[in-house]
Image (cartoon, rainbow, N blue to C red):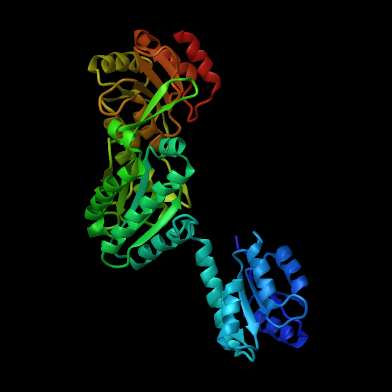
Amino acid sequence: MDAGPERILVIDDDPGVARLLEELLRSEGYDVACAPDGRSGLDRALALDPHAILCDVMMPGLDGFDVCRILRSHPKTRYTCVILVTAKSNPADKVLGLRAGADDFVTKPFDPDELIERVRTALRRTRELAGLNPLTRLPGNDEIKRAIELQLDEQKPFALMHVDLDNFKAFNDCYGLLRGDAAIMALAGCLREVADQAAGMPFVGHTGGDDMVLIVDSEEAEPLAKRVLELWDERVRDLYDQEDLLRGHLETIDRNGRTRRYPIMAVSVGVATSDRRSFASHWQVSDIASRMKNVAKRRVGSSYEIDRREGDLRVTEIFTDGELNYPPVEDHTILVVDDNPMIREVLATYCGAKGFTVLEASDGIEAYQLAVKHRPAFVVLDFKMPHLNGQYTAELLREVAPAATIIALSAYLDAKPEWADAFIEKHQLHDLPSVLINLGSKATRPSEHEEHVTEQTD
């Protein structure tokens, strides 16, 4: 939606000057309001929340320096761009203005073209500062979007790296917000150092929290990702107390009185490159990098993962205006995921006899690949498997088959885990077809079915 023209407030006790400034600024497309003195100017500034203020220095009552100081002390106008308009041109007066918090000066009599250019420059600088993360002073989401779009427009091979910390929340909860901020600053420092080593014009951005991005030339992506890991693993040790480092983990007590252990923070990096695949929007690049980061997070310790696939994006990878376009759900398809081939065979026999199309996977990675291609309506997922267990596999499958009903299968559990929609025990394999029929072949996961399945498994 169009936000409309930028608002500028003119504060000047000379009606002629105020009218001249108003007409000049309006001719450039700005929305202009005027105030005849410092006190009313402050009131209008708080009421209008302008993008910039042009304020005369020599006024009765509150002069321009006073107005500027008060604007800088108020939370609502602390970051508003202030340009002082003055007939004084000596350095001492400009020092006073700078100390009061002015962003720029225009000397009377002013050149119209120079004044407009100073206003444009000040507004542009204000927009840029507003987009910076207040902690790291790195560009935020709007600038990241623009940086990616610029790379796409130039059609040069580039890499987008999504970076975040593993076990940051536990660290933040244990040591407090200030130590958490120190960890975020340390990660930003690692990325800045890596960017300094990169060729071309690298870009470092901060999406929020412990999530950051780095845009570099595609051929540098892998060595720079490795360097991020190296720098972080060196510097993370300075963030922990010595006793926790010696233990190799943090220990906390949860609300149920149980001891929880969290490993030392690691960094995960996911990389999408444009030299192997074509992207139509910043959404698509960001999504692939994020998926690669999620794969990296499955590993122990600091890790990176690069999307090495070639060719067009699959249907399940195509983002349009922030929405992922999924292929239709295959209503009568069930994906059975279990490392035990006998279990898979039994379930395939039972479900096939009831008219279901059965896909079989021996582990989470194979399950992910099948789900991307076939989009099953149901997934029967073993709780305990090597490499990726049921919970991790479920998280992966939710990305590519969000409408699938996931049924946990276990000989160890006695209740439905949080990550599943339903649950059966392994000694009840023969009940699976009736459970599927009762759930219904829908592309949603209605909660009213869960109670029915639980009753069958008690």
Q: Total marks drawn?
A: 0
Tell me which residue sits at (51%, 65%) in the image.
Answer: 129
Query: Hey, which quadrant is residue 237 in on the image?
Result: top left
392 or 84: which is nearer to us? 84
Tell me which residue sits at (37%, 46%) in the image.
Answer: 164
Query: Hey, which quadrant is residue 248 in on the image?
Result: top left
Left or right: 343 as drawn, with respect to 19 = left
Q: Is residue 77 visible?
A: no
Where 431 sits versus 252, above or below?
A: above
Question: In which quadrant is the N terminus drawn?
Answer: bottom right
Left or right: 301 as drawn, with respect to 322 = left
Tell me which residue sits at (23%, 50%) in the image.
Answer: 226
Q: Is residue 185 visible?
A: yes
Q: Position of residue 192 (x, y in %)?
A: 34, 59
432 or 58: which is nearer to us? 58
Q: Position of residue 58 (x, y in %)?
A: 71, 83
Q: Position of residue 284 (x, y in %)?
A: 39, 51
Where 435 sits versus 95, above or below?
A: above
Query: Hey, which quadrant is residue 426 in on the image?
Result: top left
Left or right: 33 as drawn, with respect to 204 = right
